[in-house]
């Protein structure tokens, strides 16, 4: 996890190939159990569930916490709570990544003031489970590294997830019909440093939209074999059609839709999200 590394100007900054699955515009974030000064007090902003993590973005550009990255590989003890006399919320803890602007771990609480905590939390646990199938529990946590180059306005696939979902799982799009505002999603040239729902990085079958050759490196739209598979499955290079079909079936075999409040405890591993070094940095042209 990292602090103030997932925003650009007035919007959210994601990795090349990372896709926003769900978006909620009215969320309160509370951080506790850590003495980092920026964590004091409730924060009001937006939450993004992506193929690789959760991201909080503040609505206040002067907030000490402009953004907060919750990569799946760094989450622990996450639960969806349904108290009798107050709003539902998501809670858990997350470990800091090296060079992520704080140290140790911090507990968090996410309250969805417009509703949807159960749906968002269940989807997050589902996405985290999918991503965990591709992670190496013995890998050391990667340190945070700033993007290697400038960032750009994201192509529509970054905030318009495939309607067929992922590996047979269709996220609760109807519970979160809104999309981020125009010109509020930016993408860097840096690929995700940890696996996501689809194993690696890449928008499913996305059109060209970037400078240079039209797509960032590793963009699946450049690969003619990355089509024709349900659920957004992208076969790796060199995999035959029959092998890809078998892999796709294996990926969807785990599905259990009846455990919305189960804690997710992945192996100890940290995040290295994509972003720029300082929250006050000026966007490169």
Image (cartoon, rainbow, N blue to C red):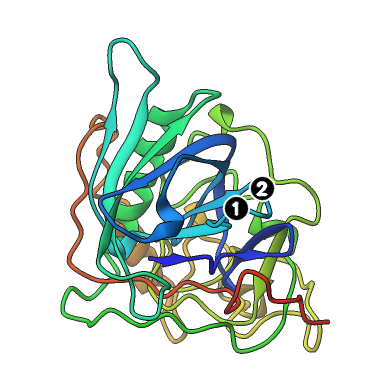
- The CA span between labels 1 and 2 is 5 Å
Residue located 41% across and 65% down the image = 196
Side (left or right) of 74 relative to 14? left
In this rendering, is residue 31 above or below 102? above
Residue denoted by label 2: 60
Q: Residues within 10 Å of mark 1 (few under 14, many from 20)?
A: few
Residue 140 in the image: x percent, y percent?
23, 82
Tally of numbered tags: 2
- x and y, in percent, of residue 180 in the image: 70, 46
Secondary element under disc 1, as helix, strand or loop, is: loop
Front residue of 149 and 126: 149
Q: Residue at x 41, y 53 (%)?
A: 39
Name the residue located 31 percent from the left edge and 58 percent from the top edge. 35
Compare residues 197 and 264 and report the one nearer the observer: 264
- Give the camera-side residue of 159 and 251: 159
Q: Which mark is residue 63?
A: 1
């Amino acid at each position: 996890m990292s602090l103030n590394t997932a925003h650009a100007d007035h919007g959210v900054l994601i990795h090349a190939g990372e896709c926003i699955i769900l978006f909620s515009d009215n969320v309160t974030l509370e951080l506790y159990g850590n003495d980092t000064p920026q964590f004091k007090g409730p924060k009001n902003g937006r939450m993004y569930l992506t193929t690789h993590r959760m991201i909080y973005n503040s609505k206040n550009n002067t907030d000490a916490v402009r953004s907060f990255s919750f990569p799946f590989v760094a989450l622990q003890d996450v639960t969806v709570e349904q108290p009798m006399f107050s709003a539902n919320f998501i809670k858990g803890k997350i470990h800091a990544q090296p060079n992520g602007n704080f140290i140790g771990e911090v507990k968090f609480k996410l309250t969805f003031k417009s509703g949807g905590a159960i749906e968002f939390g269940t989807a997050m646990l589902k996405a985290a489970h999918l991503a965990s199938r591709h992670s190496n529990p013995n890998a050391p946590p990667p340190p945070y590294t700033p993007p290697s180059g400038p960032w750009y306005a994201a192509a529509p696939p970054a905030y318009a997830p495939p309607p067929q979902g992922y590996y047979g799982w269709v996220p609760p799009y109807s519970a979160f019909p809104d999309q981020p505002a125009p010109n509020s999603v930016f993408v860097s040239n840096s690929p995700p440093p940890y696996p996501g729902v689809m194993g690696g990085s890449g928008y499913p079958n996305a059109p060209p939209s970037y400078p240079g050759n039209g797509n960032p490196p590793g963009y699946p739209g450049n690969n003619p074999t990355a089509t024709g598979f349900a659920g957004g499955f992208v076969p790796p290079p060199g995999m035959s059609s029959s092998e890809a079909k078998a892999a796709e079936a294996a990926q969807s075999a785990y599905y259990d839709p009846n455990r919305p409040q189960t804690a997710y405890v992945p192996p100890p591993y940290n995040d290295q999200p994509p972003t720029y070094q300082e929250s006050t940095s000026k966007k490169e042209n």
